[in-house]
Image: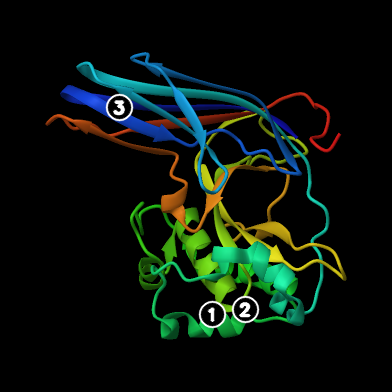
Amino acid sequence: MHFGIDYVTEYRYDGEVIDNLNAIRARPATTPVQRCDEFHVRTDPETRLHRYVDYFGAEVVEFGIDRPHDHLSIEVRARVTTTEPDEPPEAEWDALRTTAYETVAGEFLLPTGQEPRPERTAELVDLTRATSPLATLRLTTELLRDRFVYDTQATFVGSTVDDLLDQGGGVCQDFAHLGTVLLRAHGIAARYVSGYLWASDPEGGDDSMEVETHAWVEALLPGSGSEDPVWVGADPTNGVLAGARHVKIGHGRFYQDVPPVRGVYRGQAMAEPGVKVTMTRLEAQPSPRA
C-alpha cells in the first residue's frame, strides 16, 4: 500500500516562552516491508533542524527556538510504501535458547523495571502459553483484545501496566506495554512499536481519514532450521498480526523510548497541544522489496 501522511502538532501558549527545545520522531522507518519515499518537516516559527539516528534506529529531528514566541507549529509530511510481510516462521520452544537467538534478542528479553508484580500477570501468562512461540504470539494478541476494553478515558500517557490491569481497559499504548511484558515472561524477546494504522477497509472505503498515532509490539521469533530469527509485528489492540496497513516509525523497550514529540521550554505560559494526523491512500507504487 502507498500512503501520504500529514502530521501536525500545534501549541498556543497563553503568554510568551523562550528556549523551546524539541525532539520529534515521525519519519516512517525503512524495513524489509516498508520504504519512506519522502519526508519533510516545517516549523513555525522557522528554525534550523538537526537530524540524527537514535540508539534504537529511529530518526530524530531536533530543533530549538531561543527567541520569544507565543505559538509553535510542527508540520510533518511523508510518503511511505508498505507491503504484507512474509508468513512468520514456526519453530519449537527450544529454539529460543540458542546463542543465535539470544544475540539478536539482546535487551528486549530483559525486564525494564516498569513491570507489575509477577503474581499480577501470572494468570495471563498461563493463558497465553501455547504450543510454539508463534502460537503464543497469536494467542497473546487475541487474548488482550478480548480481555481488555479499548477506553480512551481509562488511562493517560503516563499510565503503567498496573493501571491497565486495575481499570480493565486502556489505549493501544497500554495494550502494547502489557503485550511486551507477557511475551518476555515466555522468554520471547519483545519490543514496543510506535506508528500509524490505516483503519479503513483496504479493499475500499475512504481514501483519506484522520487517525491517531498507534502502538503495537514486535516479537522476535526463531527462524525455521538454520534461518535467522525474525521480528514479527502484532497488534493486541485489534487482535491481529501487523501488516501493510501498519506504518512503523520506530521501536524501543517501551513508550518513553519512542515518543512522537518531547520538549521543554522556559516561561510561565501554559499550552495544550493540538494534534492532527491525516493518512491518505495513494495510487500504487513499486513494492519496497522491488
Q: On the picture, is 250 further left or further right than 87?
A: left
Asked whether residue 102 is in view, the answer is: yes
Cα gap from disc 3 to disc 2, whole angstroms? 42 Å
Give the spatial CA distance, label 3 vs label 1: 41 Å
Instruction: Work out how far the residue at label 2 is from the one at label 1, CA to CA, in angstroms.
Output: 6 Å
Single out the residue that lies furthest toward the top. 46
Instruction: Give the residue type at disc 3.
Output: Tyr
Tell me where residue 44 appears, x and y as whole percent: 36, 16
Tags 2 and 1 touching, CB below 8 Å: yes
Q: Which residue is mark 3?
A: 11
User: Are there few (<14), some (14-19), or many (20+) residues within 10 Å of tag 2?
Assistant: many
Tell me if I can see residue 239 in this picture. Answer: no
Secondary structure under tag 3 reads strand
Q: Give the mark nearer the N terminus: 3 vs 1.
A: 3
Q: Percent position (x, y) of residue 208?
A: 62, 27
Quadrant location of the C terminus? top right
First along the sequence among labels 3 and 2: 3
Q: Quadrant of the N terminus?
A: top right
5 or 147: nearer the eye?
Answer: 5
Q: Which residue is mark 2?
A: 128
Q: Determine which residue is flagged by label 1.
A: 124
Q: Which amino acid, mark 2?
A: Thr
In depth, the one of 283 and 177 nearer the eye is: 177
Give yes or no for contact between labels 3 and 2 (Cβ–Cβ under 8 Å). Answer: no
Q: Residue at x 78, y 41 (%)?
A: 83
Question: Vertical placement of 82 versus 218: above or below?
Answer: above
The spot of residue 283 in percent (x, y) is 77, 24
Which amino acid, mark 1?
Answer: Leu
Q: Secondary structure at mark 1?
A: helix
Q: Position of residue 92 (x, y in %)?
A: 79, 79
Q: Nearer the viewer, residue 89 or 12?
A: 89
